[in-house]
Amino acid sequence: MPVATSVFDALRELLAGAERVVVSGHEQADGDAVGATAALRRHLELEGCTVTALLQEPLSPRYGFMEFVRHYEVYDPDRHDALIRAADVFVMCDLSSLGRLGRLQTAVEASEAATVCVDHHPCEDGGPASLNVLDPDARATGQVIWNYIDHVGGRVDREIAESVFVSLCTDTGWFRYPNTDAGVMKLAAQLADYRLDLPEIYRAIYQSNSAPMVRLLGHVARSMNEERDGRLVWAFIRRAFMQELGVARYDADPILDVLRSSGQVELVGLFTEREDGSVSVSLRSRGTPDVNLIARQYGGGGHVYAAGTVLANEDAVKDMVSTLRHAVGGDA
């Protein structure tokens, strides 16, 4: 259900009394986490607040067209832990559990800052923060930020519109996913009125893969595992292979699009080995099974169509694949 007026009012009161605010999203930030963080950062700046936006990794080149490129910092414990401790408010965007803060979690838990969670994912325990601004009916967390700005009568400029549009277009797969409805299209049209270059935004996000990334896409297409008559598709990407190709990092969506391109696919899992031996997981479905429920079993979260988590090691991948097989059902 939509965010209650009282919750938006509580957020306004909290932010109005804050001198120093830190805003961030989940680790390996996708378009929604980036867009929501960027939109809120700009709103707070326009309101005269001292605000710092943190990402845990450099912004993906896919989002290099955004004004936000000039207004965020990459988290460095030596530089930012003291900043987080001294903050009045820490806002986390687009996550339903503290574990998705990654390296930021320890610093946030050690801080006396009031915590706020703004999210559109289902959250069974009421949310991970002291104030949770949750709207599972929203199509993106950026849309929740937009609704908040509208509620408080905040000024909107091109940077805010661009940021919210990035949230909306990426979490709806450029308005192709089942979560696209008339309300989404009306909001997208409203945002586009702020002189957004839609063809350029589409090209940057969906048609700007590097040569190493294209080779990685080809590798995944060749090595993917098809099970349950093609209804389950999953792939494992080793870090050594990424280093060999020269892929420093990647966005999961282009690879997930390859994995779920077959008409019979119901569930997709992408497992990526990380530097410390842990494994990043991205899950996608057509709505059945609910990948949020699966991810939550492993400490992650998301929503019915898309979710993610991090596994401790490769051995845990075997257990999760077994869970995915069971979720799809049927014979191998």
Image: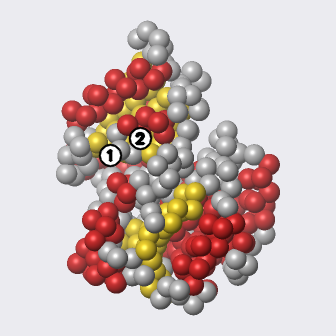
Identified by mark 1, the residue type is: Val
Q: Which residue is drawn at 34% across and 23% down?
A: 322
Residue 108 vs residue 227, the one in the foreground: 108
Percent position of residue 172, x then y:
63, 48
Reading the chain from its start, which is encountered first: label 1 or label 2? 2
Task: Give the SS element for disc 2.
Answer: helix
Identified by mark 2, the residue type is: Arg
Q: Quick one: label 2, few (<14), some, or many (20+) residues within 10 Å?
A: some
Percent position of residue 81, x then y:
28, 77
Task: Give the SS element for disc 1.
Answer: strand
Percent position of residue 269, x then y:
42, 34
Residue to which mark 2 is pinned: 296
Residue 286 vs residue 9, the one in the foreground: 9
Residue to which mark 1 is pinned: 310
Q: Residue at x 26, y 49 (%)?
A: 274
Name the front one of labels 1 and 2. 2
